[in-house]
Amino acid sequence: MLFDVLHLRGRLLTGLPWTERRQELEALGLAGPAWSTPAALVGHGAQALRATREHGLEGLLCKRLASRYAPGARSRDWIKIRNMRTADVVVGGWLPGAGRLTGLPGSVLMGQYERPGGDLRYVGAVGTGWSERERAELARLLHASETPACPFAQAPPVAATAHWVRPRLVGEVRYATRTRGGLLRQPSWLRLRPDLSPEESSAYLD
């Protein structure tokens, strides 16, 4: 996906405003079997964001029309607005942390059911969103639920270093989108749901 052009026919374009760089990019007519120039929308931001939500897209990248390209620097002239979703997940295992997290979970392995009474499918690992106290409490619960058997219908790629637990802990996570393989992209832990059993939760695949 070609979003910008920085150097063209011996000319450095980073000092030009975005509108002029965009004109240069569009004039190239770059389209092919494995590359394209996505359309850019000027204005109508609220409607565009709503459309991304309705179509299950990640969000918007908003750029000031007069913004220059700043190599290697963050700029408030470019802002990413992500559509974040939440989901219930069932904890099926954990990966040990390192360094100051030795003995504690570095991340937990999440699952969701195909349907009520169906197989538990692996949907990714989450390793952010806990305070130190919450991580320590989660470690206690995980150690109390350990089992030698993998609870997922298909063992995840991290199985060699995983500790398995009985699938009875439910958590709520925030995530951006799902990958084509069904994994949750950019997950962050929100809270443990001790009020819910897996059967009572909505931990099912979309």
Image: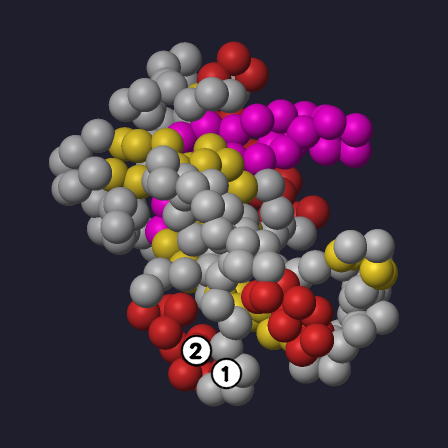
Label placed on residue 48: 2
- CB within 8 Å, label 2 to label 1: yes
Vertically, is 142 above or below 39? above
Front residue of this view, candidates 20 and 83: 20
Q: Quadrant of residue 118?
A: top left
Residue 190 visible in this rendered orientation of the protein:
no
x then y, percent, for residue 130: 62, 50
Label placed on residue 1: none
- SS class of the residue under badge 2? helix
Vertically, is 41 above or below 6? below
Label placed on residue 45: 1
* Amino acid beneath label 1: Gly
Task: Assess whether residue 105 is covered by the magenta stretch.
Answer: yes
Q: Residue furthest front?
A: 9
Q: Residues within 10 Å of mark 1 (few under 14, many from 20)?
A: few
Front residue of this view, candidates 51 and 129: 51
Residue at horizontal 59 percent and vertical 41 percent from the top: 127
Taking the image as shown, residue 117 lies to the left or right of residue 104, namely left
Front residue of this view, candidates 160 and 167: 160
* Dominant secondary structure of the residues highlighted in magenta in the image: strand
- SS class of the residue under badge 1? helix
Residue at horizontal 30 percent and vertical 32 percent from the top: 121
x then y, percent, for residue 151: 33, 23
Residue at horizontal 66 percent and vertical 52 percent from the top: 131
* Amino acid beneath label 2: Ala
x then y, percent, for residue 113: 25, 39
Look at the image and give the residue range highlighted in magenta: 88-108
x then y, percent, for residue 169: 39, 40
Find the distance from the CA under tag 2 to the CA under tag 1. Answer: 5 Å
Residue 203 visible in this rendered orientation of the protein:
yes
Task: Assess whether residue 142 is covered by the magenta stretch.
Answer: no
